[in-house]
Image (cartoon, rainbow, N blue to C red):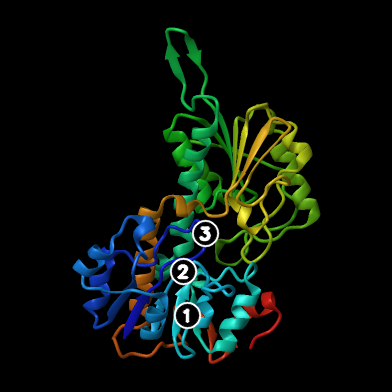
Amino acid sequence: MKIGVAKETLPGEARVALVPSMVPLLTKGGHGVLVQSGAGEGAHYSDARYEETGATVVKSASELYESSEVVLKVQPPQAEGKGSEIALLKADSVLISHLAPAENKGVAKLLAEKGVTLFAVEFVPRITRAQSMDALSSQATAAGYKAVLLAADHLSKFFPLLMTAAGTIHPANVLILGAGVAGLQAIATAKRLGAKVEAFDPRPAVKEQVESIGAMFVDMELPKEDAEGEGGYAKAMSEEFLKKEQEAIAGRLPKMDVVITTAAIFGKRAPMLITEDMVKLMPEGSIIIDIAAGTGGNCELTEGGKVVEKHGVRVFGEPNLPAKLPFHASEMYSRNLVNLINYIYPEADSEPDFEDEITGSSCVIRGGEIVNETVKNMVGGGG
């Protein structure tokens, strides 16, 4: 089977779906690996390195898509413009990438109409035997880490406690909203930099995890609702619940130098945790890093891809932080994809077992139809 690695076309996307060190893990199983020239440049992987590990470098996107049975990408395929990737995909080909269906409804429909089979990495089930294929978690690790570094770079204060000849410098106060993979990594990174860290999450079950890595857990009065949905994801909550969350957060904001928001609801708009009035409570010069900017943001002032300064506070809308760490983010994503490919196609000539939980759950489009009910509901139909 010929597996093609496409060069990402989304502006600012520096990651690549397969790094050179992973190529032998596919070729030893009998697969051929094609790489579009320049695909790895943004992550500092040259064409020569791919060739050294057994891949064949092809010059153009059209040649790659025409020659590949399976195409690997990071971002969903671009649907419009001169470089439309959907137009390049063969009708009988397989695509493995992110889909982000809530933000790319048209893409899902076009792929179904084209007859492409799509395995969407965000639909790999969160079960023990699929952990090595969990691209959402690996990329969230990169996002949580980078968010703290971004905050430290732009904050006009030191992060750690310093005892100096000029007196004592108190540590920065950092609040992390959301204690999923990104939030926990942000907590750990902020602690390593010496900040005083607090964390908020509406799921009481994560309190022990938060405290185990050195942060103070911010409690709230819980209405009679369970904030955790299927697969460990947070779920959409009632207006009453959201108001209680905002009250708990607002009580911590007046002393916070940095707030990092990571709260997301799978397939839906990110919850609004910080209103403009709440931003006014923060000290001048403080910073909000909104990792959830790609799905609407957790702060009312967030604008995706922009820095908004209002009421003396800067709000960074960061929809794609993993792309700012392309070397290691690509390495982790690549390992997730190779594990998924070798699971779906254990032999070079094998066919996917769509009755299998991992294969069936991650397959979103097949036979000209959107077969995943969640995606079907998001885009309003199937093919």
**Is residue 221 shown to the viewer in this render?**
no
Q: Give the residue at x 47% y 45%.
A: 146
| Mark 3–mark 1 distance (CA, rounded to whole Å) | 34 Å
Give the number of the mark in front: 3 or 1: 3
Label 3 Cα crowd, 10 Å radius (few <14 / some 14-19 / many 20+):
few
Outermost front residue = 82
Residue drawn at point x = 21 percent, y = 73 percent: 54
Indicate whether 290 appears above or below 363.
above
Instruction: Name the quadrant containing residue 38.
Output: bottom left
Left or right: where does residue 329 sit relative to residue 381? left
Asked whether the residues under the numbered discs 2 and 1 touch, taking CB atoms below 8 Å apart as contact, a structural biologist would say yes
Q: CA distance from mark 2 to mark 1?
A: 10 Å
Q: Nearer the viewer, mark 3 or mark 2?
A: 3
Q: Is residue 142 above or below residue 169?
A: below
Residues at badges 3 and 2 in contact (C-beta under 8 Å)?
no
Of the image marks 2 and 1, the number of the one nearer the N terminus: 2
**Would residue 8 appear left or right of 33 to someone viewing this image?**
right
